[in-house]
Image (cartoon, helix red, strand yellow):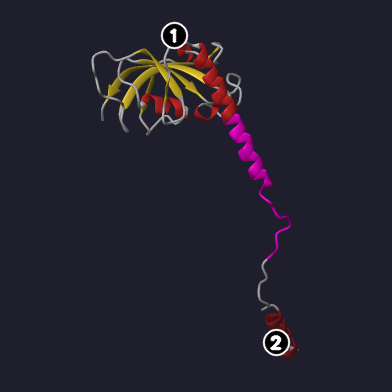
Amino acid sequence: MNRLLIYLIVLVAFSSCKELEARKPVTRSSGSYNQESIVRNKDLVSSEEMQIQSYIAKDTLNTYLASNDGFWYRYVTKDSLGVTITPQIGDLTQFTYNLKTLSGRTLVSKQEIGNVITQIDQSNQELISGIRDGLKIMKEGETVIFLFPSYKGYGYYGLENKIASNSVLACELTLYKIKQQ
């Protein structure tokens, strides 16, 4: 009986030592979804830039500047004292802002938000990337109106019950204080 049991164990051990085989994928992706997504996103960015350019063309009283970060802006109040300090990484800033549509409808007001204190590129990641980038070009006391395409704003997700997905935003931002770290 013991011999039979040992023989059975040895037989099972040798038969289970088969080399592993790689599983083949059930479906193969051709990458067409990614290509379609790229085309959709390029079309969206192009459409949003046309909306912004149309807005700028209608606003003949003001001069807008294009930033290297993908948004446009104009000064409402510009530093006239020649201060050269702009916020750097780690500096504390105090500011207020509001968000509107290009047609002027307020989406989020300064009163709702209140004063915001944030450390540049180190805290408050709830801020949209457009505001984080916009702060870096401002000086104390300046008020700037930024025009953000959706990828610099709330993008595909929007802001619950306030900002629809893929919305172009106009943001009026006032920088009150920079505390260098």
Q: Secondary structure at mark 1?
A: loop
- In this rendered view, identify the residue nearer to me: 6 or 56: 56
Is residue 149 on the magenta stretch? Answer: no
* Residue 12 seen in the figure: yes
Is residue 28 on the magenta stretch? Answer: yes
User: In terms of image quadrants, where is residue 73?
Assistant: top left
For mark 1, does the 10 Å Cα neighbourhood hold few (<14), some (14 to 19), or many (20 or more) residues?
few
User: Where's the C terminus, which quadrant?
Assistant: top left
- Circles 2 and 1, Cβ within 8 Å, touching? The answer is no
> Magenta segment, which residues?
23-45
Q: In the image, what residue type sits under mark 2?
A: Ile
User: In terms of image quadrants, where is residue 127?
Assistant: top left
Residue receiving disc 1: 61
Q: In the image, what residue type sits under mark 1?
A: Leu
Asked if 10 appears above or below 149 in the picture, the reply is: below
Residue under the image location 31 percent in, 20 percent down: 139
- In this rendered view, identify the residue nearer to me: 83 or 88: 83
Residue receiving disc 2: 6
x then y, percent, for residue 49? 54, 25
Q: Is residue 175 left or right of residue 22?
A: left
The single residue placed furthest to the top in the displayed view is: 61
Residue under the image location 69 percent in, 51 percent down: 30
Whichever of labels 2 and 1 marks the residue nearer the N terminus, that label is 2
Residue under the image location 32 percent in, 33 percent down: 89
- In this rendered view, identify the residue nearer to me: 180 or 173: 173
The single residue placed furthest to the bottom in the displayed view is: 3
Asked if 179 appears above or below 26 in the picture, the reply is: above
* Residue 127 seen in the figure: no
x then y, percent, for residue 8? 74, 84
Q: Secondary structure at mark 2?
A: helix
